[in-house]
Amino acid sequence: MQDEIKRARLLIGTKEKTLSEPLRNNQTRQAALLSLSSVHPDTNNVIPVLFRPPAFAPMALPWVIVSSLQHQAKSAFFFQFVFHSYTTAFTLLNGNGTPKAEGYSLQQKQIFYGLGAISYAACVGALPLIFMNRYTLKSPLAQLIVKKILPAPLLGLTSAFTAAVVRSPEFEHGIEVMDRNGKVVGVSRNAGEKAVRETALSRAVLFGTTFLLPEVLVHFVQRAKLVKNPRALAAVRMFLITSVLAGMVPVSLSMFSQCGEIKRADLEPEILSSTEEPELFYNRGI
């Protein structure tokens, strides 16, 4: 697979295509798509196949489904820990590659931050069930809040939290900003903060909606008595989660362009003095 990616990048290079020239040749177009989905734009490293954008939905889907079906605190913690581990690794490998640090390994720092964020997010996700079991809350209202209402906002918030934490070095150290010709004009913390904020928001929308919308639809299915068998209802819930996640992944990934824009006035003074471009660009990551 890596040889195929190298051949694709070589083909693109020999064609000498530019951003303003359309890729009319089908072979070149396919090579460009393979390169974009497989190679990190900042480091030119090949992204592991399980953490490329096309693999995101198939890899996240099983953990989303099993997390939505858990009613015991321990199992909920375990499955959410696995879920956040995957999404955090995906975020780390597809983030901006600019941040550098001296005296320690930045990647080790990100992994350490990520493990802390994953553990915290899994605990928060299981907390309502822990609280319910601890105080034996069995009323219909408590069951509705803990099992139906809270999971969606909690998963959305914890997904945004893990994304922001693992990519925090981007607003600590800054990311490269470029002019329209691709020339790097500086490293901006403000651009890094904007990139991380947009990515975290897209994660919250993706997984919050994926948890909330199927529950709302299942509620109406139950009220209409369209499905009475518990197994059939579970199958309907799985189908709805799969459909919503498949639809929301491209929506969330396209909420903000991967090639982000930031106005010159929003940048640091040292960058303002080095360019007159009204807008600058950066790799937002995914």
Image: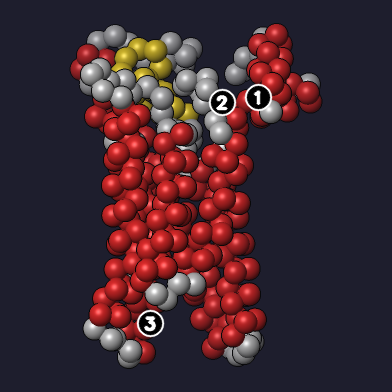
- Which of the pair 67/169 is nearer the observer? 67
Q: Earlier in the sequence, mark 3 or mark 1?
A: 1
Disc 3 marks which residue? Answer: 144
The picture quadrant where one finds residue 167 is top left
Amino acid type at image mark 3: Leu
Q: Are marks 3 and 1 in contact (CB under 8 Å)?
A: no
Residue 46 numbered mark, or none: 2
Distance from the alpha carbon under mark 3 to that under mark 1: 49 Å
| Residue appearing at x 65%, y 24% in the figure | 2
Task: Give the left or right position of residue 198, taking residue 244 as reference.
Answer: left
Task: Give the left or right position of residue 14, taking residue 149 as reference.
Answer: right
Tag 2's secondary structure?
loop
Amino acid type at image mark 2: Val
Disc 1 marks which residue? Answer: 2
Tag 3's secondary structure?
helix
Amino acid type at image mark 1: Gln
Q: Earlier in the sequence, mark 3 or mark 2?
A: 2
Residue 164 seen from this side:
no
Distance from the alpha carbon under mark 3 to that under mark 2: 45 Å
Position of residue 50 measured from the top left corner of the image (x, y, whole percent): 57, 41
Q: Earlier in the sequence, mark 1 or mark 2?
A: 1
The residue positioned farthest toward the left in the image shown: 269
Q: From the viewer's perspective, is the residue at label 3 or at label 2 nearer?
A: 2
Above or below, 168 against 269 in this view is below
